[in-house]
Amino acid sequence: MRRPSIGFHRTVKGIQRNETLEVVRVGAKGVVAHNDRGEERTLTIKQARSFDVYERRAMEVAAGDKLLLTANRRESGFRATNGEIVTVSRVDEGGRIQLEDGRELPPDFRHFAHGYAITAHRSQGKSVDSVIISGDGMRKEKTIANHEKASEASAGCWSGSQPPRCSARTAEGEGGREKGTAGASWCACSLSPR
């Protein structure tokens, strides 16, 4: 059975900021968790605003992988921004992850996931060469906004297993905005650099 992990974003009595504990059990006075050194701590309701609860999962990371950093971190020698996409340059024999921009993820920084797929909200402000948009259940306005970000993209949208012969940019609506993408299950766009 996987146990939840608790990551602290504030220092509290006996626990440092950015420290991660693993839940062991629920005790009479609160949740009992232990740190990497095996020391047990009892967490009370008063500390609830000082931590986040998440599930720790093993994941393979190799050179060339894209990672999505999912937490902010500001400390001497390392800065990370939530939503930042980075590329792994190497993973050394100790498991330390080196990034192409020269940074190394600290051993206690565990807030990342593979960065190959992100939500429309996380994509805001990102520059990319190509995208695939899954538009299932996406409102027409959201789909149009995603295509507008593509600037002079060549795009194809389809619903089902076979793409149609027509492009997503088939009709103009109010204000010159494209229609034709609403209700599409998948959109594949090849973006032109600006």
Image (cartoon, grey):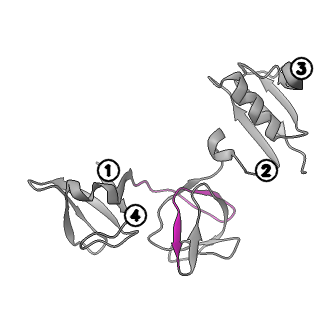
Would residue 43 be counted in the magenta stretch?
Answer: no
Q: Is residue 76 above or below residue 63?
A: below
Q: Earlier in the sequence, mark 4 or mark 3?
A: 4
Q: Which residue is mark 3?
A: 172
Q: Residue at x 50, y 56 (%)?
A: 59
Local secondary structure at mark 1:
loop
Q: Which residue is mark 2?
A: 128
Q: Earlier in the sequence, mark 1 or mark 2?
A: 1
Q: Which residue type does callout 3 highlight?
A: Glu
Tell me if 98 is positioned left or right of 128 in this view: left
Q: Nearer the viewer, residue 171 or 103?
A: 171
Q: Is residue 118 above or below residue 178?
A: below
Q: Is residue 106 above or below residue 49?
A: below
Image mark for residue 2: 1
Q: Which residues are magenta?
A: 56-75
Q: Earlier in the sequence, mark 3 or mark 2?
A: 2
